[in-house]
Amino acid sequence: MSEQDNLPKAEGIEENTAAINNEEVNTASDELINEIDNSNAEDAEDESHLERHDIEEKDYDTLSLDELVLELENLVEHQKIQTIKKHVDGIKTAFDTKFNTLLEDKKEEFLAEGGNEIDFYYSTPLKKSFNNAFKEYRQKTKTYYKNLENNLKSNLSLRLEIIENMKTVIDNEDSIGNKHKQFKELQNQWKSAGPIPRDKYNNAWNSYHFNVERFYDLMHLDRDLRDKDFEHNLLEKLKIILRAEELVKDENTNRSFRELQNLHKIWKEDIGPVAREHREPVWERFKEATRKINDKRQDYYKELDALYIKNLEHKKEIISKIETLAAEKIDNHSGWQNKIKEIESLREAFFKAGKVPIKVNEATWAEFKAAVRSFNRNKNEYYKGLKGEQLNNLAKKLELVKIAEANMASEDFASTTPLMKKIQADWRNIGHVPRKDSDRIWKQFRGACNSYFDRIKEKRNEASAEEETAFTTKETLLKEVAAITLKGNQKEDLVTIKDYINQWKTIGRVPSNKRNIENDFNQTLDTLFTSLDLNKTEAEMIKFENKIQDLASAKDGRLLDNEQNYIRKKMDDVRGEINQLENNLQFFSNAKADNPLVKDVYKNIEKHKDSLGLWQNKYKLIKQLRKANEPQPEANNTETQETEN
C-alpha cells in the first residue's frame, strides 16, 4: 500500500468540514433562539413592553445638566414607568458624571481660596430638581412592581391550573369531539391568562406546548378534526416565515430584530403544532431567516464599534489639547480668561464626540477629568496668588483707614489737611481688594475723610453777598425754565435748553447751605429731556457737564476730587461686576443660547457695559476740565528749574 493510500480521501475531509460547519451554525442558531426566548421571557412580565421601543433614545452624554433634568422630568411624567428604565439609567449616569465634575471643580476652587475640606458644600437648584424627579421615578417603580408581582403570581397559578386541566382532558375517556371542544376552551383561557414571572416563562410554555402536541398526537382517532387544526397552524406559521424573510431586507436592523422577537413570541404562544412531517422543515426555515436577520444585526454592531473607535480617537485628541493648555504658563487675568473659554469649548466638544467602546469608557473619562483637573489646579493657583495680592492691598488700605480715623477730629487744620489729602492719593494708588471688603472699607475711609473736611466747611464764613445774589438769580431762572413750553422740534428745543444751562453756569456759585437748588435745576432738566425723548446717555452727560463746572468753581477743591474718586470707584465696581458675570457663564457652558438663564446673564453684561461707558465718559470729562484749569508754567521759569535740576 502506497503512502498516498494511507491519506484520508479529500471527499471525506470535505464532508467532515461541512459537518463541523453545520454543527457550528446550529449551535449559533440555538444560542440566538435562546437569546430571543430569554428576551421574550423578560418582556412577558410586561404586556406593554413594545412601547419602550417607541421612546426616542438620545445620546445623553451630549446634553447639559439642565437638559438632562428636563428629559428625566418629561419621561417620569408622560411615559409608563416600566418602559423608561434604560433611559433613566442613561440620564442618571450622564448627570452624575457631569455634576461630579462640576463638584470637583468647585471643591478645588474652595480649597484654593483657603477653605477647609470639611467645610465644603455645594449644590444647585438643578441638583435638587434632578433628585426630586429621580425620587418620584423610584416611588412609581416600586409601586408598579409591587402590584405586578401579585398579578404575576396569580397569573402563573392560573396557567399551571390550565395545564393540569389539559392533562385531565387528554387522559379522560370522553369522546374526541368533546375533548376537542374542552381543549380549545382551555387554549383560549391560556391566551388571556396574562403575564407571568420571567423565570417561570419558558418552563410554563414548554409544558403547555408538550401537552398541546400530546393532545394532537392522540387525536389520530379523529383525523379530519386534527388535520384541519394542523393545516390552519401551518398556514399561520408560513405567514410568520414570509414576514421574517421580508425582514431580512429591512435596513433598520434594530427594528427588524424587535419584530423578529415578536414573531417568535407569536410562534411560541399563539400558534399550535403542525403535522409531524412539516414540523422540522418549517422550524428550520424560520431559524434560517432568524439567522440572516441576526447576521445583519451583528454587521451593524461591527459598524457601530468602528464608529466608537473613531469617537475614541477624537476624544484622545481633545484630551491632548487640554493637556497642552494645562501645561502653558499664563501670568495675567486676560490670558487665563481666554484659556478658560478654550477649555470650555474643548469640554463641550468632548461631550458631543459620542460614545466610545465600553471597555475603555471609564479610562477615557478618567484621562479627561485628569487633564481638566490639571488645568483648573493651575488656574486656581494663579487666582490664589492674585487673592494674596488683594489681601496685601486690603492691609494697606486698612492702615489708611486708621490714619483717617485718628485725625478726623484734629483741630490743626494747617498740618492735618495735607496729610488727609495725601492718604486719599495713596488710597487711589493702591490696587484692588477682595470684593467682599471693597464697599465696607471704602465707606469707612470716606466717612472719616468727609467728617474731617465737613468740620473745615463748618468753619467757613457764611455765604458772601455775591453768592446770595447768585442764588436769587438762579431761583428766578429756575422758575423761568420750569415754565417754558417747548416747540416740539428736538433740535431747536435742545438749543434752547443748552442756552438756559449756559446762563445757569455764568451766574456763579450759591451759598453752600442753599446748594439744593442745583438738584432742583437738574430735576427740571430731566423733565425737559424726557419730553424731548433725548438719548439717556446724552442727557446725562449734558447735566454732568453742568455739575462739574459748578464743582470746579467751588472754593473747596475737595468736591471735584471726591467726584473723580467716586467715578473711578464706580468704574472699578462695574468692571468687577462684568468679570463676575462672564465667569458665571462658565457654569452654563453646555446650555443652549436660548436658555433663559444664559440670556439673562448676557443681558446684564450688556447693561453693565453701557453703564461702564457712561462712567468712563464722565471720568474723561473731569480729566479734561482739570487739565484745562491747570496753570501753565512760564517759559523762563521752566528753563530756570531745568538748570537748577
Image (cartoon, helix red, strand yellow):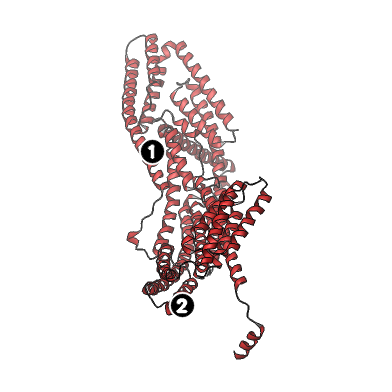
Rendered position, 421 above or below 242: below
Rendered position, 525 above or below 46: below
Circle 1: residue type? Tyr
Q: Name the residue tied to disc 2.
A: 418
Residues 98 and 209: in front is 98
Circle 2: residue type? Pro
Q: Is residue 506 visible?
A: yes
User: Are there few (<14), some (14-19), or many (20+) residues within 10 Å of tag 2?
Assistant: few
Residues 505 and 102: in front is 505
Residue at horizontal 51 percent and vertical 48 percent from the top: 600
Could you say where residue 612 lies in the image, as x and y percent from the top left?
Answer: 55, 59
User: Are there few (<14), some (14-19), or many (20+) residues within 10 Å of tag 1?
Assistant: many
Q: Name the residue tied to disc 1.
A: 137
Rendered position, 502 above or below 132: below
Rendered position, 133 above or below 399: above
Which of the two labelled residues, at mark 1 and mark 2, occupies the earlier sequence position? 1
Answer with left or right where residue 34 lies relative to residue 331.
left
Q: Is residue 314 visible?
A: no
Residues 531 and 367: in front is 531
